[in-house]
Image (cartoon, helix red, strand yellow):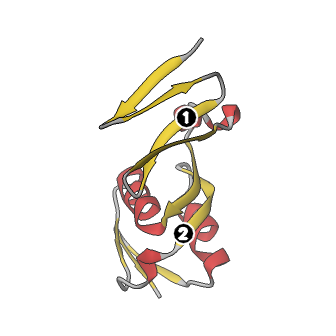
């Protein structure tokens, strides 16, 4: 099937395997990885060109923790995934490839 998506004066017709998003106020479309759709149901969270701040928010929500880090780090872009089964593993998957270190102290995670 097809889906019509509109924003202000722009309109897209999406076909199977496509999704819409707004980038700098412009409505755009991109391919969807069908394997990633609904992965949250199994505890997997995938990110493609996502601001690190978005990933941090999801980590905090899934693990009921607070992450403290310098504001300039949150401007980075993340490509990858984590699973909500293991906090330490999830933090490794997100922060280690970026050359960042983290420390867990109860419900507080500090990233440098």
Indicate which disc, 2 or 1, sits on the residue closer to the N terminus.
1
Residue 10 occupies which quadrant of the picture? Answer: top left
Q: Residues within 10 Å of mark 2 (few under 14, many from 20)?
A: some
Identify which residue is drawn at 46% across, 21% down: 4
SS of the residue under disc 2: strand
Q: Please state which of residues 76 and 103 is positioned toward the viewer in this rendering.
A: 76
Q: CA distance from mark 2 to mark 1?
A: 20 Å
Residue 62 lies, in percent from the top left, at: 41, 50
Identify which residue is drawn at 67% across, 75% down: 97
Identify which residue is drawn at 61% across, 32% down: 18
Identify which residue is drawn at 35% across, 82% down: 71
User: Which residue lies under the disc numbered 2?
Assistant: 77
User: Which residue lies under the disc numbered 1?
Assistant: 19
Q: Is residue 52 above or below residue 81?
A: below
Mark whose residue sits in front, 2 or 1 = 1
Q: Is residue 22 above or below residue 103?
A: above
Q: Please state which of residues 56 and 7 is positioned toward the viewer in this rendering.
A: 7
Residue 66 lies, in percent from the top left, at: 32, 68
């Amino acid at each position: 099937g097809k889906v019509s998506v509109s924003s202000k004066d722009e309109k897209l017709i999406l076909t199977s395997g496509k999704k819409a998003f707004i980038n700098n106020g412009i409505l755009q479309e991109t391919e969807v990885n069908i394997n990633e759709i609904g992965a949250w149901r199994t505890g997997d969270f995938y990110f493609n060109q996502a601001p690190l701040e978005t990933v941090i928010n999801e980590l905090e929500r899934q693990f009921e923790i607070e992450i403290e880090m310098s504001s300039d780090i949150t401007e980075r872009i993340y490509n990858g995934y984590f699973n909500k089964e293991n906090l330490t593993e999830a933090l490794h998957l997100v922060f280690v490839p970026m050359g960042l270190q983290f420390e867990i102290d109860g419900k507080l995670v500090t990233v440098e």
